[in-house]
Amino acid sequence: MTMFWTIWISVITIGTIIGCYWLLQWTLANKTGVEEGESMGHEFDGIEELNNQLPRWWTILFYLTMVWGVIYLALYPGLGGFKGFLGWESANLHVTSLEESRLALREDIEQGRINEYAMQVKLAEELFDPIFEEYAKTPVEQLASNEEALQVGKRLFIQNCAQCHGSDARGQRGGFPNLTDNDWLYGGSGDKIKETLIKGRVGAMPGWLAPFGERGIEEIVAYTLSLSGREVDQSLADAGKTRFMACAACHGMDGKGNQMIGAPNLTDNIWLYGGSERQVTETLNYGRNGVMPAFDQTLGEDKVHVVAAYVYSLSQE
């Protein structure tokens, strides 16, 4: 926080307390010239206004509120850069990176600093880490039949994965796979799903417009669509079959893909970026690039294990 904001906040905060005190003193003073308890000369609908002081209990509450405000400002941060005598912090606000945040968090926990976020993390670790450690002892496929673990995995999925794959895990067009259909780019076993979550994935397909031209792309599109039983111009598909040799390096000669590198199966009519002729043409013209972040540092391996079990369960009958 800059010096300007430090001074600005301090002036407003202290000025408000002083202003409240002055206002209370001003209202308690009798400046009307009318004796206390006498009529102010105002009457409305039979109700006459008298010159009475504020009730004593009300006045005392006002004073206590101001005293509490001063005590609070002394104990907790509230006046610009002043951290308060307790040294309390809501979180490590000085960090500039995730790694720096992790290090500062661990240091606060180890040294017992009064950091609200660190204290909450420590409490959560003490409560829940033993549960996740116990779940981690069970293979993903077996854990997928544990209803309690699946509910935990579902909540973690919604918090961390639903932004891309949807709350129902059915994905969305544009490179976010449906996780419920048993069609997997890198494999759908428990270990493979866990590997994907821990390490993340980077998928890339080059654009082919420059080497093949528009006519060549049209032929490859026809052949690619024919692999999933679509009706196409057979003459274009026959010409595209020869050109498909360049695609076979990743997708295989039969077009069934390669889970070792995440190359999609082109024969099942399931399309990550859309399967219309226009969308497949766009994919071939310009290529595609997809990135899934790694969650090893965000969630940790034990939590990833539970999420993997939940994701695995979605594609099982």
Image (tube, rainbow, N blue to C red):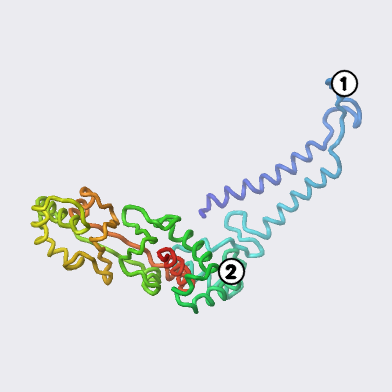
Hey, what amino acid is under mark 2? Ala
What residue is disc 2 on?
Answer: 124
Residue 170 appears at what percent x and percent y? 39, 56
Query: Residue at horizontal 21%, vertical 48%?
Result: 278
Taking the image as shown, residue 3 lies to the left or right of residue 252, namely right
Mark 2 vs mark 1: in front: 2
**Foreground of the two, 230 or 94:** 230
| Secondary element at image label 2 | helix
Crowdedness of circle 2 by 10 Å Cα count: few (<14), some, many (20+)?
few
Q: Percent position (x, y) of residue 22?
A: 74, 41
Disc number at residue 46? 1
Q: Nearer the viewer, residue 75 or 191?
A: 191
Q: Toward which corner of the image does residue 251 lie, by quadrant?
A: bottom left
In the picture provided, is 94 more to the left or to the right than 200?
right
Q: Residues within 10 Å of mark 1 (few under 14, many from 20)?
A: few
Looking at the image, do the residues carrying marks 2 and 1 touch, with CB atoms under 8 Å apart?
Answer: no
Answer with the quarter of the image where residue 245 lies.
bottom left
The image shows residue 48, relative to residue 106, as above or below, that is above
Residue 253 in view of the camera = yes
Q: What residue sits 82% from the left and 47% below the top?
A: 60
Residue at 51% x, 69% y: name it.
104
- Residue drawn where x is 18% and y is 53% of the image: 285
**Which residue extends farthest bottom?**
137
From the top left corner, tell me how far across and down residue 146 is, in percent.
Answer: 52, 70
Q: Confirm whether residue 94 shows in the render.
A: no
Q: Is residue 219 above or below residue 49?
A: below
Q: CA distance from mark 2 to mark 1?
A: 63 Å
Secondary structure of the residue carrying tag 1 is loop
Q: Which of marks 1 and 2 precedes in the sequence?
A: 1
Residue 198 in percent (x, y) is at: 40, 71
- Of residues 37 and 314, the one nearer the viewer is 314
Amino acid type shown at disc 1: Gly
